[in-house]
Amino acid sequence: MKRIAVLLLVLLMLFTMSACGEKRILHCDGCGVECKVDADSNMTEDWLIYCKDCNNEIFADDPDMQIP
């Protein structure tokens, strides 16, 4: 019984470690704060990137562009 519990614990730990993908840090073009995106994303610093606060301020008139 203990072997099964230890095996399940090890598998759970491996799963949680693999579930967290690497992140790439980009910077908000509005305020310069760091924004994390998935490492496999094609986003680069060349893109116009806004943090949640800047996005909601810039697109305040367009509710479809608001980030909850």
Image: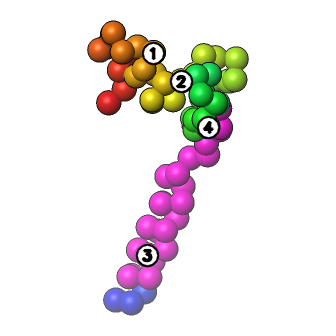
* Residue drawn at the location 49% of the way across and 68% of the way down: 13
Residue 62's image quarter?
top left
Count neighbours of disc 3 (C-alpha within 10 A) and say few if under 14, some if 14 to 19, many if 20 or more.
few
Quarter of the picture holding the C terminus: top left
- Indicate the amino acid at tag 4: Glu
- Give above or below for 21 relative to 26: below
Query: Residue 53 location in percent, x, y?
Result: 45, 29
Residue that numbered label 4 is attached to: 34
Q: Nearer the viewer, mark 3 or mark 1?
A: 1
Mark 3 and mark 2 lie on one chain; the one further toward the N terminus is: 3
Q: CA distance from mark 1 to mark 4?
A: 18 Å
Indicate left or right for 8 with 17 as reference: left
Q: Which mark is residue 9?
A: 3
Q: Are marks 3 and 1 in contact (CB under 8 Å)?
A: no
Query: Residue 65 location in percent, x, y?
Result: 37, 15
Q: CA distance from mark 3 to mark 4?
A: 34 Å
